[in-house]
Amino acid sequence: MTTGGDLLLKTLSETRGIVSKYVSHFISNTDIEPSEIVDNWFSSRIQMYFDQPLHTEVTSIDLTALDVVGQVTNPKKIKLVSIKLNYFRGFRTLEKPINLQGGLVVLDGRNSSGKTSLAEAIEWLLVGHISRRDSGDPKELSQYITNRFKPEDENTWVELVFELDGEIQVVKRVLLRDYDSKKNSNCESQILHNNVDQEALDSSYLVDQLFSGVAPLLMQHTLRLFVLDSPDKRRDYFEQLLSLDRITLLIEKSVVGDARFDDFPNKSGSTMLAEWSGLKSATTNKNLFGSVEHADETQMKDTLQEVLIHIAVEEFKLDSQLPYSRIVESIQTQQRLVRQSSFPLLEVLRPKRTLDEALLSQLTIANYDSLINRLQVGRSNFQTAVDAAKTISESQIAISKSLQNLRDAGLILDTVENQVCPLCEYQDIPTLARQRIIEISAWDPARTAVWTARQSYQQVLDDTMRVFKELQTLRGDLLPRSISDQQWSSAESFTNPLIILQIRRFLDEIDEELHEFDLLLNDSLGIAVALESNDIDLQTNLQQIAAFLPRIVDHARTYAGRFSDFESYIDVMASEDKQYSTRGLWLKIAENSEVLLSDLRWEIAKKKTQKELSGIRDTLMSARQQYLETRRIDFSNGISDVWGKLRTDSYAVFNKLFIPEPRGKGFPVKIEVKAMLANNTETYEVDALSIFSESQINVVGIAAFVTRSKLMGHSCLVFDDPVQSMDEEHFKTFANNLLKHLCDDGFQIIVLTHSDTFARDISYAHSDRLDYVTMKIVHSKRKGCLVEEGNRRVVERLDQAMTYAEDGNLQQAWICVRFAIERLYIVVQIKYGHSDFNPSTWANHTAEAMWNESVGAILVRHVPESAARLREILDMTAGGAHDKYPNGSTDLNNAVNDIKPLLNKLRVGG
């Protein structure tokens, strides 16, 4: 089902421009809270304006050029065929379903005969609950659905057979749990559609699937609700057509005021805007700040620097000829001097490093695992090389090294058989044989392996020493140490001794806890490592040192927080210098100018987005109002059309539905019913409820129901006693005008009424309609509510005559034949007699009187061959009266067979 409001949103999403994108974003995120949808859009648009200069314009939308009619697309053609009730309300069990086939079906019966039970059966079947019970007293209407005489082994259910676009469908609702006496009690049921269990579906599945969410049923107790409800509740009557909740909710949520700007902070997370605001409050010339805030984004940086220089010159009395960098240095020096004069120990206590991401990644145990592994591998390789070289003496290794040096110098050649040793200068004899060189060369791999392992291990040791030194420096940078007693004592004269004592005790506790860590570092740095010995295992030292790192990080975090609090305390002391805090703000902005500019551009993006959202909201409200006006005209014209068919008043008449412009929280839609009050000279538009009679109120209720059903695309309508509070004159207008209009429009109409007069008026008005059917509802103490064959039409009375004859009740059968003839005479007179003929005037006429007045002449003119036979049959209907025994079944069958063809010959429906 596509209803108006949904179609409106969908149509808006398919237009061009920013409104279309906004609506598309909303309707594509139905699984998210509406407020969150708007906030997400707002954040993304801020980011877009922040990333690049955008120039968007919110344009208005003219719905008159769009096909937004609010009607159901592809309405289903539905015709009711039959309904069967089992222990529902006043009904018990029926031998056969109630036949509803016909274009106009009228079921009449006295009060308490079961008409409302039948109407509520249709209502419960379609929507899963009963409106009269929902709005009534729960105690008085407890166990409302189940017939009190239902046996334990029976179920309460209602089954409806209908045609859906020409195909037969069967739906059945079975009661699982009836209403109890609690206020919020609900009944529970199970749905079967074509014998398929639909238990998992919502109880409104049938009405949603078949009738676009609105049951085509006008009940006695709902007839006047539309008029008597408050103006804002009347909107609910047309809600399925309007379906404005989503767009109304979107309009309501599409507001982001200045107070909510803090909910959309820059991703930098900075507080520079607060510093900017603080500096603005502390300076004299506040207009300077606006020049930055409203500057072109390409000029903001230069403008900010100019403003800061201006403030420094005006507020801090600095030389305007100084370059900007010198101004910053000068203000920094002034601040430092003030702090030092307030508390000289402050810079000693200040952590020299902060725990940023890079430092935190360095101070992890896992970060030292690879170094520990390198130490282990380096020592192992070195020891292995030394052990492998033990087969060669140290002197041999020395000789091997010397030989290699002489080779490298070109003093010894491997290719010469015998040569002079360059070391034997005292004799020039070729005593160095080639074999001796080969022998010495065999010692070289062992020497090379020992040298390579030594160098590799030494590199690891050097890296380890560097890490130790870095950790020693880092420990002091994060957690100050080596502060003398004299320094602490002198500091107490500048501030509260208790404050000094607290921070001193904290540092002393840290020194005590990290004492072993400090010793390990000092020992490791002070040891001259002998490569060939195992005097110290640096792996163990490094593992123990690394194990302290998590504690150092925790202490550093805690100390940084305490120092920040301590510095704030010192700042308060320093603030006795009136310009200290102002200079501090100035410096923060100067040192973080890029961050501030980012935050200012973010605020500008917010303002642009806010303005854009306001324009979108105005456009949505305008589109909603255009749509409402279109719908109002449809509703109002429809009601006027129905009113004109039911009433011919001239003094007080229905004028229009009026929908004032929505205002207030949530922009509620209100529908006001206006009437026109007129005399010979003047007319006034007034609230209808203030002047309409009970009958007129009912007419507006009927008109609203019919109008809604038409606009919803319904093809069948059920009326439960629709003419209550009407006089007999309007019985006729309902039967003659409205029902004829609806039937001619293709509606299947089912009317339940307790008024015999109204039922008779319908029968007279539709006597020529072939698909008109009547039935009678009666109540039996033994069987409960029953629906019997109709007895208002010629064919129905003849069929009843045959039924009585089959039961052997010939007397009653002939009475039915007489009733059929009287009915035939009346419909003939309606069709062929005077146009001003009133059938009610013949209510007490006999068939003979009808014949004599005018029917005889009409029948002789149209079917002359049947006139004598009708007279003969009429004489036979006197059987049972005047001491005359009724004729037999053969005569009865012949009489029926002779009367039925006359309907076609006379071209009347009967």
Image: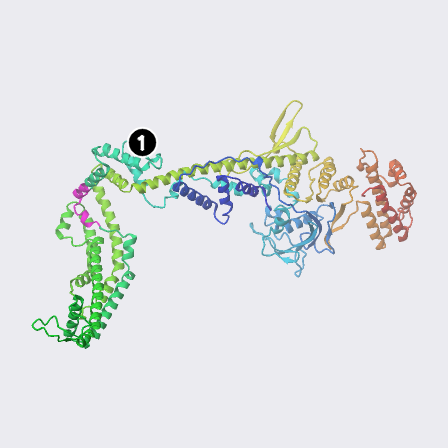
Amino acid carrying label 1: it is Asn
Residue tagged 1: 287
Colour scheme of this structure image? Answer: rainbow
658 w.r.t. 448: above or below: above
Q: Is residue 545 visible?
A: yes
Say how many tags the image has. 1
Front position in the image: 727 or 792: 792
Front position in the image: 905 or 502: 905
Residue 57 placed where, x, y %?
Answer: 46, 36
Helix or strand or loop: what does disc 1 sit on? helix
Is 761 part of what is drawn in magenta? Answer: no
Q: Is residue 258 visible?
A: no
Range covered by the magenta-colored residues: 336-350
Tell me the chief SS of the magenta region.
helix
Q: Which quadrant is home to the C terminus?
A: top right
Q: Picture quarter containing residue 97? A: bottom right
